[in-house]
């Protein structure tokens, strides 16, 4: 299995990206990684060159670049050359912690889209109280969506949850302002009716307050709403730990209490740590493309690589293609 990684993307590139790749090479015997970026900077952190290839790229797409323009103009950037590794068949999948919009554009323009999928969706796995986590899509790849797009998201999310996360008959929920049938705006009402007919285990509408309780294994929404929900969850978790730290550091008595529960608090923080779940897959593209968190450390990069290997091994993209094609055939037969 071959995975291409944008070694220059992310807040801590290339060091943490390369170190995460080194960890993955030690863990997975059948894995070959291509690191794309400034060869001199990458080589500085390569501790084991076995099953590692470096492809030099002298340009970097930054967070300030306009995504589409950057992908078209910076042909020698680490992100574009990474995507080309997949397009040319030299890699089975790719990972970047860089500019999300640019990765989306590189995925569409270079890697290509699955036939029958109108728009790819950005899909992270978020934590739940019981520790299992849930997949949410879309969280920002497309701010606007049609009912048919949400159904496609649901099908892709269902395939991923079953194939990669080993969830039998995963529960698919539609994010809404209430759980009752008929709730929501025109988009969610129409999507609700379509999802009832789709080849998924649709459990109906779910509310945002229940997301972390594990109300569904896959939660579907449009990119605007999904991004707001994602940032709210991330912000709430960060604020909660800040308040806990301030409380425990406020007096000698609370400092002593903090010492007693230190390990328990670390366990709680780990449960809410995004790095445990890998990256956010861009579902709908012709090969696995994974967006790692911009502030990824080596642990998070390792998790993203592990997630990507599972996608390749379990033929997630191929299964999505087959499912979508099957639905198209059924629709034609019913006409």
Image (cartoon, rainbow, N blue to C red):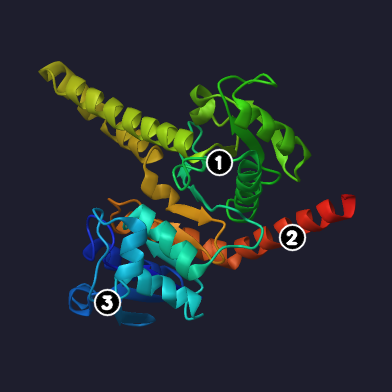
Q: Which residue is mark 2?
A: 325
Residue 246 in the image: state x and y as whole percent.
18, 23
Residue 17 appears in the figure:
yes
- Whether the residues at callouts 3 and 2 have beta carbons within 8 Å, the answer is no
Q: Residues within 10 Å of mark 2 (few under 14, many from 20)?
A: some
Distance from disc 2 to disc 1, alpha carbons, whole Å, reads 21 Å
According to the image, label 3 marks what residue? Answer: 57
Of discs 1 and 3, which sits in the foreground? Answer: 1
- Residue most extreme to the right: 334
Residue drawn at x 70%, y 21% is 181
Most foreground residue, 140 or 14 = 140
Say which residue label 1 marks. Answer: 145
Residue located 37% across and 53% down the image: 100
* 133 with respect to 60 (left or right): right
Asked which secondary structure carries label 2, the reply is helix
Q: Give the spatial CA distance, label 1 vs label 3.
A: 35 Å
Q: Position of residue 4 (x, y in %)?
A: 41, 72
Q: Residues within 10 Å of mark 3 (few under 14, many from 20)?
A: many
Is 307 rendered above or below residue 238? Answer: below
Q: Is residue 164 left or right of residue 257?
A: right
Q: Are marks 1 and 3 in contact (CB under 8 Å)?
A: no
Q: Out of 60 and 165, give the one closest to the viewer.
A: 60
> What is the C-alpha distance between the residues marked 3 and 2?
37 Å
Name above or below for residue 195 compared with residue 159.
above
């Amino acid at each position: 299995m071959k995975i291409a990684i944008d070694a220059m993307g992310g807040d801590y590139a290339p060091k943490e990206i390369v170190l995460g790749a080194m960890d993955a090479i030690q863990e997975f015997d059948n894995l070959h990684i291509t690191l794309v970026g400034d060869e001199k900077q990458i080589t500085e952190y390569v501790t084991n060159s076995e099953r590692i290839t470096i492809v030099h790229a002298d340009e970097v797409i930054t967070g300030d670049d306009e995504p589409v323009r950057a992908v078209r103009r910076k042909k020698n950037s680490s992100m574009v050359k990474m995507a080309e590794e997949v397009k040319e068949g030299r890699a089975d999948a790719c990972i970047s912690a860089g500019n999300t919009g640019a990765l989306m554009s590189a995925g569409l323009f270079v890697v290509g889209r699955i036939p029958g999928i109108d728009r790819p969706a950005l899909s992270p796995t978020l934590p739940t109280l019981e520790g299992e986590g849930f997949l949410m899509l879309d969280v920002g790849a497309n701010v606007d969506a049609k009912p048919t797009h949400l159904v496609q998201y649901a099908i892709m999310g269902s395939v991923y949850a079953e194939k990669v996360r080993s969830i039998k008959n995963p529960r698919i929920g539609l994010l809404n302002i209430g759980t009752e049938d008929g709730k929501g705006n025109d988009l969610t009402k129409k999507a609700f009716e379509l999802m009832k007919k789709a080849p998924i285990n649709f459990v109906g509408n779910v509310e945002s307050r229940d997301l972390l309780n594990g109300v569904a294994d896959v939660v579907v929404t449009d990119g605007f709403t999904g991004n707001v929900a994602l940032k709210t969850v991330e912000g709430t978790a960060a604020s909660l730990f800040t308040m806990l730290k301030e409380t425990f550091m406020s007096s000698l008595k609370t400092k002593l209490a903090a010492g007693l529960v230190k390990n328990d608090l670390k366990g709680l923080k780990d449960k809410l740590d995004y790095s445990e779940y890998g990256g956010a897959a861009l579902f709908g593209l012709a090969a696995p493309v994974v967006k790692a968190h911009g502030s990824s450390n080596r642990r998070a990069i390792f998790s993203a690589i592990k997630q990507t290997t599972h996608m390749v091994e379990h033929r997630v993209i191929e299964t999505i293609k087959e499912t979508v094609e099957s639905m198209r055939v059924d629709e034609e037969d019913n006409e």
